[in-house]
Image (cartoon, grey):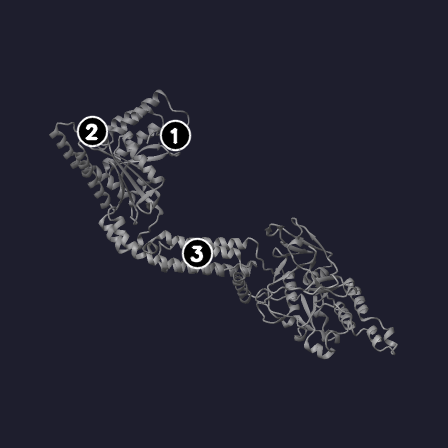
């Protein structure tokens, strides 16, 4: 039970398991998850309703019209009169959101059967024929049909030519299809210029958010595709014959779904099933004209001219009422009007196929970020970050809705991120006490007391588990250790190493460094972790200089022991490599045993530089970044060195002292002249300058370097380097 509260990995596993479950739930997308998404979309629409247009007029068979002209259905001659009047007033198209499935019971032929003694009925034309003739003569009428669960004897008549211009298979495989439609009398549909479906399929909560612009009649798996009433009304208004369908949207096992529909110059985006997201402006009384006013001639022609006219009803008794995100009850015909206005004005709502995947990915990335950051930052900071991210997510979703017409789900990602944050915060707080207790145990042997006190007072400065940060890394090694050890007993050797490593360790800690590990006669240390250390490169360089001074009492003791035993005295000298750069630093190892350590290219470079101090005859070798960041210390450049294991050369330096002086400046000037002569292939000049520099007091600890350069110059003098030589020396050994 204790490990549950203290193990970071158990906590991470729990959080990842929770996140995986949340992502799997989103991928499965059950109805409750879809409902959350729709709540977001509805909220956007309520906040930012569409600006209504004036391109569509609804002729409303309203309660007042019914009172004036009698109950529905009206005689088809009245509808013929209405159609002619509307077309004469300049309408581009007139579409009936009504199905005339049965013959007109008020037709003279029915009256003649009822009143056989009245001959006048026999001579009058049939009402349906009159209506059909008017429809044909005007040439702008669109009839309608609607899906039904009851078997029917008639199928809808095709008027529009629908062509698939995208990838195969035909989009018929993807559109919503049903086995039965309630259709008009054939005489009416045949006379009409267009024929479309006014079928709507509400979401689970009863709201109309998407309307299929294409529907299918499924007869024994043979699907015939028809346009929606709104789409067909647009086609007739534009006087077009063809509706083009592009099918290269979402890919499934069957192929590609619908992507968009084109009528004339209008391209209409849809989902993969050919459904259209309705961007509601809300109920607008200005869209409506009473059918009674049309029949009585009380409507100004300008109200109808150049408009697409829809005929529908708002009468409660005729049961064509729908629910939308903006209105609890609205006539169904107004939904078609909203669709037409959107198309004409180019005001679309789209949800591209990749949005589901993108939202899942964003949810995963943000949640993973919280999981990764929770152990390292305070709950308050993390809460501020989470709130900022959630606000940013909703802000983008609202911006995308308003300016781009994109439907972005911000609710599910926000809900997932919030749950992950709450659980991560709880688990992190459970670990806080355990981490505080770990600090002294894990770091008390590696860092100075001052750093230990600072760390204990502010544990948040410690971020367990690893991070990447800039470090200054040091490697030290004893020269000729094998030779020295041969003259000592095991006890004396252990004592020597204790005498050597104790002051070296103290120096590192005094300079705010961290001792990483001991490797026999070698030691690794670094600066700027676990706590920030300002000017960490300079602290490392000062520690290196102090180490040389600290060897004096060690050598005195070793010399006295050798003289006492009559052995040959071997001086203890060190090689120190310094490098500054990014490293991965943190607790590394196994769960049972771990150590705070650093890894990376900078660590490798420091190790290689320590190995090269012997070849170059210098006690300290530092990379260029260390020399640059150490400030105003007495550095001189040694070489352009490509150490083993690296492909690019490194400009390397050694340290003469912790501060510059006039003597040093003069020495450095002459030293730089030597390097310039050497790299310019002025071998004799370089050799002479090396001899001169070796005699300088400043060079007492690095005479071996000048011997090396002079030797190289002499060799190059006999066998010049190849053309293009840039002064780089490639080391073949570590």
Number of other residues with Cα within 10 Å of mark 2, as a class: few under 14, some 14 to 19, many 20 or more: few
Q: Name the residue under label 2.
A: 486
Residue 480 in sight from this viewpoint = no
The residue mark sitting in front, 1 or 2, is 2
Residue 201 coordinates in the image, percent (x, y): 63, 64
The residue mark sitting in front, 3 or 1, is 3
Choose the circle earlier in sequence order: 1 or 2.
2
Q: Name the residue under label 3.
A: 18
Q: How far apart are marks 1 and 2 (CA)?
A: 43 Å
Verify CB contact (< 8 Å) between mark 2 and mark 3.
no
Residue at image location 59% in from the left, 70% down from the top: 327
Q: Name the residue under label 1.
A: 726
Residue 131 coordinates in the image, percent (x, y): 79, 68
Number of other residues with Cα within 10 Å of mark 1, as a class: few under 14, some 14 to 19, many 20 or more: few
Choose the circle earlier in sequence order: 3 or 1.
3
Of residue 530 and residue 628, the one placed in the foreground of this image is: 530
Residue at image location 70% in from the left, 61% down from the top: 232
Q: Quadrant of the C terminus?
A: top left
Q: How far apart are marks 2 and 3 (CA)?
A: 61 Å
Could you say whether the residue bearing mark 3 is in a helix, strand or loop? helix
Could you say whether the residue bearing mark 1 is in a helix, strand or loop? loop
Q: Is residue 553 above or below residue 285?
A: above
Q: In this view, does 289 lie above or below 344?
A: below
The image quarter in which residue 123 lies? bottom right
Of residue 197 and residue 680, the one placed in the foreground of this image is: 197
Residue 438 in sight from this viewpoint = yes
Choose the circle earlier in sequence order: 2 or 3.
3
Of residue 249 and residue 284, the one placed in the foreground of this image is: 249
Looking at this view, name the residue that lies furthest to the left: 564
Residue 659's label in the rendered image is: none
Q: In which quarter of the image is the N terminus?
A: bottom left
């Amino acid at each position: 039970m204790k490990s549950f509260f203290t193990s970071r990995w158990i906590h991470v596993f729990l959080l990842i398991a929770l996140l995986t479950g949340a992502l799997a739930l989103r991928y499965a997308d059950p109805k409750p998850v879809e409902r959350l998404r729709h709540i977001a979309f509805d909220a956007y629409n309520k906040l930012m309703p569409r600006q209504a247009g004036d391109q569509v007029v609804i002729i409303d068979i309203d309660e007042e019209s019914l009172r004036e002209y009698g109950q529905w259905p009206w005689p088809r001659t009245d509808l013929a009169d209405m159609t002619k009047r509307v077309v004469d007033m300049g309408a581009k198209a007139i579409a009936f959101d009504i199905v005339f499935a049965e013959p007109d019971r008020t037709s003279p032929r029915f009256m003649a059967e009822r009143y056989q003694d009245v001959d006048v009925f026999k001579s009058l034309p049939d009402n349906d024929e009159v209506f059909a003739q008017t429809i044909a003569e005007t040439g702008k009428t669109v009839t309608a049909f609607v899906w039904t669960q009851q078997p029917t004897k008639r199928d809808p008549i095709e008027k529009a030519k629908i062509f698939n211009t995208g990838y195969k298979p035909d989009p018929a495989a993807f559109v919503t299809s049903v086995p039965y439609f309630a259709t008009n009398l054939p005489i009416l549909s045949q006379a009409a210029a267009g024929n479309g479906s006014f079928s709507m399929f509400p979401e689970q909560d009863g709201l109309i958010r998407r309307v299929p612009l294409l529907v299918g009649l499924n007869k024994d798996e043979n699907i015939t595709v028809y346009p929606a009433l709104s789409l067909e009304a647009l086609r007739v208004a534009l006087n077009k014959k063809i509706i083009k369908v592009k099918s290269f949207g979402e890919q499934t096992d069957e192929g590609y779904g619908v992507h968009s529909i084109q009528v004339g110059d209008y391209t209409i985006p849809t989902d993969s099933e050919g459904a259209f997201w309705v961007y509601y402006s809300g109920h607008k009384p200005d869209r409506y004209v009473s059918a009674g006013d049309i029949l009585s001639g009380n409507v100004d022609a300008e109200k109808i001219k150049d408009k697409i006219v829809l005929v529908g009803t708002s009468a409660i008794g005729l049961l064509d009422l729908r629910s939308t995100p903006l209105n609890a009850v609205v006539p169904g015909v107004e939904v078609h009007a909203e669709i037409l206005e959107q198309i004409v004005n180019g005001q679309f709502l789209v949800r591209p196929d990749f949005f589901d995947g993108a939202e899942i990915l964003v949810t995963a990335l943000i949640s993973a970020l919280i999981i990764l950051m929770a152990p390292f930052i305070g709950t308050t900071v993390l809460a501020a970050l989470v709130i900022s991210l959630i606000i940013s997510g909703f802000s983008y979703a609202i911006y995308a809705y308003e300016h781009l017409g994109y439907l972005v789900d911000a609710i599910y990602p926000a809900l997932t991120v919030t749950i992950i944050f709450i659980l991560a915060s709880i688990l992190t707080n459970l670990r806080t006490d355990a981490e505080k207790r770990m600090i002294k145990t894990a770091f008390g042997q590696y860092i100075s007391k001052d750093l230990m006190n600072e760390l204990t007072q502010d544990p948040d400065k410690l971020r367990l588990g690893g991070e990447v940060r800039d470090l200054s890394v040091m490697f030290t090694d004893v020269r000729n250790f094998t030779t020295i050890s041969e003259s000592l007993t095991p006890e004396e050797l252990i004592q020597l190493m204790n005498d050597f490593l104790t002051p070296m360790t103290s120096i590192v800690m005094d300079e705010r460094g961290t001792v990483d590990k001991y490797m026999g006669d070698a030691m690794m240390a670094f600066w700027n972790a676990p706590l920030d250390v300002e000017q960490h490169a300079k602290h490392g360089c000062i520690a290196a200089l102090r180490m040389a001074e600290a060897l004096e009492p060690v050598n005195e003791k070793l010399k006295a022991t050798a003289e006492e035993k009559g052995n040959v005295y071997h001086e203890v000298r060190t090689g120190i490599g310094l490098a500054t750069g990014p490293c991965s630093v943190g607790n590394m190892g196994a769960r049972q045993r771990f150590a705070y350590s650093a890894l990376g290219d900078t660590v490798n470079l420091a190790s290689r530089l320590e190995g090269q101090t012997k070849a170059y005859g210098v006690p300290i070798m530092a990379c260029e970044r260390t020399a640059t960041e150490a400030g105003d210390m007495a550095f001189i450049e040694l070489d352009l060195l490509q150490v083993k294991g690296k492909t690019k050369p490194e400009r390397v330096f050694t340290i003469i002292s912790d501060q510059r002086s006039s003597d040093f400046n003069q020495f450095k000037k002459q030293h730089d002249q030597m390097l310039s002569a050497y790299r310019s292939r002025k071998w004799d000049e370089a050799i002479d300058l090396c001899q001169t520099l070796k005699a300088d007091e400043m060079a007492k600890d690095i005479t071996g370097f000048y011997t090396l350069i002079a030797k190289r110059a002499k060799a190059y003098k006999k066998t010049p380097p190849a053309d293009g030589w840039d002064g780089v020396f490639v080391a073949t050994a570590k």
